[in-house]
Image: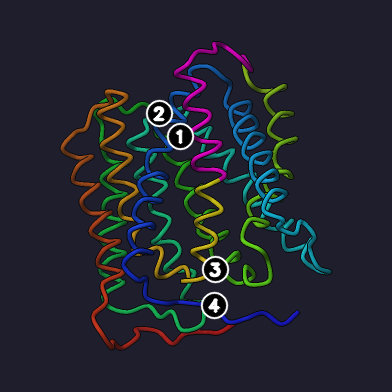
Amino acid sequence: MTQDPPNNQELPFLAGTFTMFLCTVFGANAVAIKISLLGFGVFTTVGLRFSLAAIAIFLWAIVTRRSLLIKKGQAQQLLIISMFFTVQLALLYLGLSKTSASRGTLMVNLQPFFVLLLAHYFIPGDQITKKKILGLLMGFSGLVLVFLGKKGVTTDVQIGDLMILVTAFLWACNTIYTKRIINAFLPFQVVLYPMVFSVPFFFLAGYFWDTNMIARVDAEVLLSLLYQSLVTASFGFVAWNGMLQKYGAVSLHSFIFIMPIAGVLLGGLVLGEPITFDLLLALALITSGIVVMNLKTGKYSPLFPTRGV
């Protein structure tokens, strides 16, 4: 199948503003997950979230007359995305059940740094430069600070951090692969089908491994679940993939620095999590690194030649 070359366009003002809004929405998601885990088991929460999201997206597709059909050869591509998606989300929720929303947000938002490294080899025209290397060093310095922090950090918290770090890498792999194939799909298809694929596995895992699939159900827990399902997993994912298809991974990921800021601040404000000096310094390094990597400074010389695949 012949695929269109990836887009990497500058975002106009309105598109940039909308991307900032989406990043804030995604940044708040870790807080919503922590609240929902008070009422449901880890795997049950993920299963419920994506069941509701899949139903919402399916109904939206029917009402707006989007085609649910896929072409020959696309099932294999969707299977690859679905496997990434399932493992990625399982690790994210397991990790957040062990660590704080603030720390988890910082870990998962190392994703753009992994995207940078992978894009150099798998997205034609995306070159590693001295500026981007500086951003990488800043970002991973923030990672080191998070791991070296001792106040209130147990072995369980460190395991959670590591799980979410693996999530960030898998998310980056999924982003790069999705970007290479997304022009052959309607954007909602690469959101809906991985959800449909993953839900049975999540509920099966919940049945066997959740201590309590349902511990408590109240307004706070239900609202947090609806936020994850309808705001981020349905509206947010479809909107993000639509923007990704139109403007490209590089342009969108220049706004990802908003996610850790929103997540850390809301973790402190909503959940009362301690925001230590080390955490704030790590946040500053990671967000600054993302900004530095994506500064538009005109022409620059690549450190390494780009390899097209």
Q: Residue at x 45, y 77 (%)?
A: 8
Disc 2: which residue: 155
Give the crowd class for mark 1: few <14, some 14-19, many >=20 residues within 10 Å.
some
Q: How is the image coloured?
A: rainbow
Q: Relative to residue 26, is residue 188 depicted above or below?
A: below
The amino acid type, in three-letter code, at marker 4 is Pro
Q: Earlier in the sequence, mark 1 or mark 3?
A: 1
Q: Is residue 163 left or right of 22 when viewed as pictured?
A: right
Q: Is 294 included in the stretch rendered in magenta?
A: no
Up/down of 278 relative to 72, above or below = above
How far apart are the two marked residues, 4 and 2, measured between alpha carbons?
42 Å
What is the secondary structure assignment of the residue under circle 1? Answer: helix
Residue hosting label 3: 245
Magenta portion: prevailing SS class: helix
Q: Measuring 39% from the left and 31% from the top, which residue is drawn there? A: 31
Structural distance between the alpha carbons of marks 2 and 3: 40 Å
Q: Nearer the viewer, mark 1 or mark 3?
A: 3
**Distance between the Cα atoms at labels 4 and 3?**
8 Å
Q: Pointers 1 and 3 in contact (CB under 8 A)?
A: no
Q: For mark 4, what is the residue?
A: 6
Q: Position of residue 213 (x, y in %)?
A: 64, 17
Disc 1 versus disc 3: distance between alpha carbons?
A: 35 Å
Label 2: how many Cα within 10 Å (few below 14, some 14–19, many 20+): few
Residue 159 is labelled as 1
Q: For the residue marked with disc 1, what is the amino acid?
A: Ile
| Eye-nearest disc, 4 or 1 | 4
Q: Secondary structure at mark 4?
A: loop
Question: From this viewpoint, which residue is outermost toward the right?
Answer: 72
Q: Which residues are magenta?
A: 212-234
First in sequence: mark 4 vs mark 1: 4
Q: Count neighbours of disc 3 (C-alpha within 10 A) and say few if under 14, some if 14 to 19, many if 20 or more.
A: many
Assess disc 4: are there few (<14), some (14-19) or many (≥20) residues with their C-alpha within 10 Å of its C-alpha.
many
